[in-house]
Image (cartoon, rainbow, N blue to C red):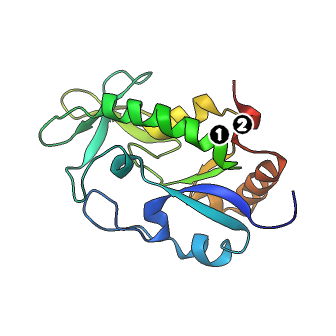
Amino acid sequence: MDGGPIRIGVSACLLGRKVRYDGRHKHDPYLTGALGPLFEWVPVCPEVECGLPVPREAMRLVGDPAQPRLVTIDSGTDHTDRMRIWAEERLRQIESLGLRGFVLKRNSPSCGTEGVAIHDAGGRPIAHGAGCWARALAERFPGLPAVDEERLKDPAVLAWFVEGARKGAATAGRR
């Protein structure tokens, strides 16, 4: 490593991009301010990049906790296959980008790294897990540090994340 900024993937909404389902963003000043000099941010929004509009119907994870589906809340439209096809291609692209970690949006059905509610068909939470993009990222690159923006504010987690990111790129942990 040359001592320059570490190249990190990030949920685009955390950088202030208006890509969320409601047309808003979730800009995180800690990421862009305090951590900005450490990292070169590479924004990713799985929902927009897989072809969904802004704004769009809110979604949640539904069904089998081991393989939940990405389904809209009101109409019940299932976007799982669309997301899976996009993710396969995007994961191949990420290998060539030299990313050394990912900061993902907490509790997002696509980006949440943990603790995302998984619902039964009636809408009741039955389990918790990772969002569909976060899960695909972890499966493809098991050694790549990935954390949500809230956990990154913990000094111990930040130290772990930076150390892991300095050790290698996304291809290093590939199975």
Amino acid tagged 2: Thr
Vertical comparison of 56 with 86: above or below: below
Which quadrant would the N terminus be assigned to in this image? bottom right
Front-lying residue, 119 or 21: 21
Q: Quadrant of the C terminus?
A: top right
Q: x, y percentage for residue 50? A: 35, 43
Q: Which residue is denoted by mark 1 in the rendering?
A: 95
Q: Going by the image, does 95 lie left or right of 121?
A: right
Q: Which residue is mark 2?
A: 171
| SS state under label 1 | helix
At x 43%, y 49%, the residue is: 107
* 109 lies left or right of 104: left
- Counting from the top left corner in percent of width and height, residue 60 is at 30, 40
Residue 156 found in image quarter: bottom right
Question: Percent position (x, y) of residue 99?
Answer: 67, 50
Q: Can you name the residue that lies furthest to the right here?
A: 2
Q: Let me know if residue 130 appears in the view.
A: no
Q: Earlier in the sequence, mark 2 or mark 1?
A: 1
**Hey, what amino acid is under mark 1?**
Glu
Q: Is residue 68 above or below residue 101?
A: above
Q: Look at the numbered discs 2 and 1 and tell me whether their residues touch, using CB distance below 8 Å.
A: yes
Is residue 11 left or right of 162 when viewed as pictured?
left
Q: Residues within 10 Å of mark 2 (few under 14, many from 20)?
A: many
At x 51% / y 71%, what residue is drawn? 28
